[in-house]
Image (cartoon, rainbow, N blue to C red):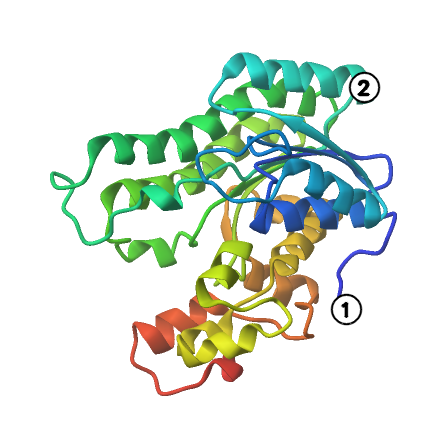
Amino acid sequence: MRGGAGRGALAGKVALVAGGTRGAGRAMAVALGEAGAVVYVTGRTTRQGRSEVGRPETIEETAELVAAAGGTGIAVRTDHLEPDQVRALVERIDREQGRLDVLVNDVWGGDHLIEFGKKVWETDLEKGLRMLRLSLETHAITSHCALPLLVRRPGGLVVEITDGTEEFNRTYRENLFFDLAKSGPIRMAFGLAKELEEYGGTAVCLSPGYLRSEEMLDHFGVTEANWRDAVRKDPHFAIAESPAFIGRAVVALATDPERDRWSGRSVSSGELAEAYGFTDVDGSRPRAFAYFQDVVFGGRKAGAEEYR
């Protein structure tokens, strides 16, 4: 199964992708739309102005891609650090749809704040605290405001997005604030799973592997069409996965009637690909975290193709 669930598998369902401007968020929104869902896409970068991230991708573009894929995409500019804005967003979803079936907490936008290799007392405190607000406070506010709508019907799904699985994050991320920012959603999913259980809901923490986001492609000076050219600069980029891979992972979860087996767990797109049988756009199943643990950190002599 290359693409995961079929078109229309989520017809009648409503999803909110918080932080769907670009990268994994955009891909998950598009995949949910391709499966037939109504997808609300939020973020701070619109055609009228950019967020502090400074990237050109907009939530309107994501909503248009959702529509082109066969779903209904609705862009709503929302700063998820502002509870009033998030409440207004949820009230709009309730007013227009009367339900919420899938919440994807993908808000981040803190990569430009990271100072690797500095002790906590050497790090710019304002940058560090901003990372925590963007990664943890945004997710907490969104769950607080959106879950009363989601739990009206049994079977709701919350997907916390982070960078790194629980096992992988046992390796220190070389910046305390970044480390906390990427470990927090794992614990959030664990706690939300407990709180949603009596409502028949599921909460999972999901991480992509080495993601070929727009920013990463720009960093290497390549496109999705010729991304393998970047392997000359970074051999480990050979294990990179397209954003579509995590999009297919979210749809696999959303369409699985037995997804509660994952509740409270930390999983990767590669792990779900093995379980559900979907592939990346090139037909492979990259296992990025196994590659990094075995080859990059463990010293095993093997190429990336062995892990695809």
**Residue appearing at x 54%, y 62% in the figure:** 212
Mark 2 vs 1: CB contact within 8 A: no
Residue 125, by quadrant, is top left
Q: Quadrant of the N terminus?
A: bottom right
Q: Can residue 180 be seen from the camera position used here?
A: yes
Q: Position of residue 106 (x, y in %)?
A: 54, 40
In the rendered structure, which amino acid carries the disc numbered 2? Answer: Glu
Residue 299 is left or right of residue 143, and the answer is left
Q: How many marks?
A: 2
Query: What residue does disc 2 label?
Result: 96
Q: Position of residue 189 (x, y in %)?
A: 49, 38
SS at circle 2: helix
Residue 94 is left or right of residue 287, and the answer is right
Q: Can residue 35 be seen from the camera position used here?
A: no
Residue 23 is left or right of residue 110, and the answer is right
Can you tell which mark lies on residue 1? 1
Give the spatial CA distance, label 2 vs label 1. 34 Å
**Residue appearing at x 62%, y 33% in the figure:** 46
Can you tell which mark lies on residue 37? none
Q: Position of residue 29 (x, y in %)?
A: 69, 44
**Residue appearing at x 30%, y 72% in the figure:** 297
- Front: mark 2 or 1: 2
**Residue appearing at x 31%, y 40% in the figure:** 180
